[in-house]
Amino acid sequence: MGDAGWRRIAGFRVVVSWPQSGYAPPPPTAPRSLRARVAGVAGVLLIMGGIAAVGVAISAQVHAPQPSLAAAGAIGSSGRLSLPRSLPVSVDIPAIGVTSELLHLGVNSDGSIQVPSLETSAAEAAWYKYSATPGQIGASVIEGHVDSYQGPAVFFRLGALRPGDTIDVRLADGVTAIFKVTGVRQYAKSHFPAKAIYQATDYAALRLITCGGAFDYATGHYLSSTVVFASLISSRSAHPRPRLRRGSGARNALYPAISAAIRAPSSQHASRSGRAGVPVTQTGGLTARHCRPVAMASTARTAPPVSMPPCTYRP
């Protein structure tokens, strides 16, 4: 190639030339093997599968129902019905499909209220034994976990209750106390109204409590509590009185004995020992999350001040 074919830059002849197109030729590439192609396709499929699995897991995650503003209702009642003191045996909430035996729990050594064991009793609710018995004048308190290591617990759907729903609490004397929900509210734990919830009342009140609201992954706590307010509206006996006809003197003579047998507490409701030596009635709710303790004052004369327990839940 003559000098005419070479370009000169600053008087120097260029010794390396580009094609007439002005671009450097692409570097030679070795043909890709079949194994490399298969590996590339497999990698893309794995990435896509992982993304799809994460999406399915997020969409399938089940969250406990939260109370609506329309369900706030009222926290008090003008009702004046009441029942004699009798220890609670079980609770039934038809609207959310809950049927649970009731443990009888008190307070821990640090003053916090005891909660059912996550390992053995997440499906059971617990009556706070320093509160009024259900149906007595005063506030009776029943608590339960919202979820457990295995999933939803006894009070998972508590936030779905609405004013007008009923709650049945069976007592040791055979009577079932029937309560009507007056309000369902959610309180931030930083502003928990312990006095309004636990203080003595002039009517037969019932409070159901569990954890709720948003979960703070940084602290490992639920930020709110769900509280159901209810009041006694009626009761029923497990053994209705027999209908006796007039003139049946022999039957009428037996009636006092029958009535006494009906009113007597059943011997099958024996007492058994609960966690930390707490007596509970033999009868027939959190998966590594903790609720922030909330100060609480007891309604019983002999009960010391206690705080709400840490509830454990799964993130």
Image (spheres, helix red, strand yellow):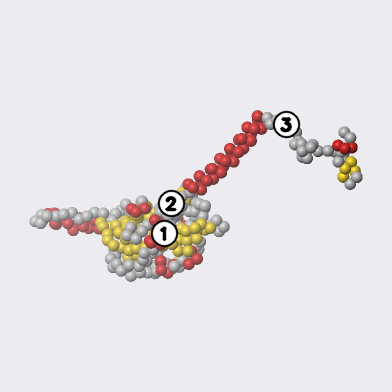
Nearer the observer: mark 3 or 1; the answer is 3
Nearer the observer: mark 2 or 3; the answer is 3
Residue at mark 1:
67
Label placed on residue 178: none
What kind of element bears circle 3?
A: loop
Residue at mark 3:
30
Residue at mark 2:
153
Q: Nearer the viewer, residue 104 or 35?
A: 35
Q: Give above or below for 296 relative to 17.
A: below
What residue is rendered at 43% in x and 51% in y? Answer: 153
Q: Residues within 10 Å of mark 3 (few under 14, many from 20)?
A: few
Q: Are marks 3 and 1 in contact (CB under 8 Å)?
A: no
Going from the N terminus, do you reach mark 3 or mark 1 first? 3
Going from the N terminus, do you reach mark 2 or mark 1 first? 1
Q: Amino acid at mark 2?
A: Ala
Q: Amino acid at mark 1?
A: Pro
Q: Amino acid at mark 3?
A: Ala
What residue is rendered at 28% in x and 65% in y? Answer: 81
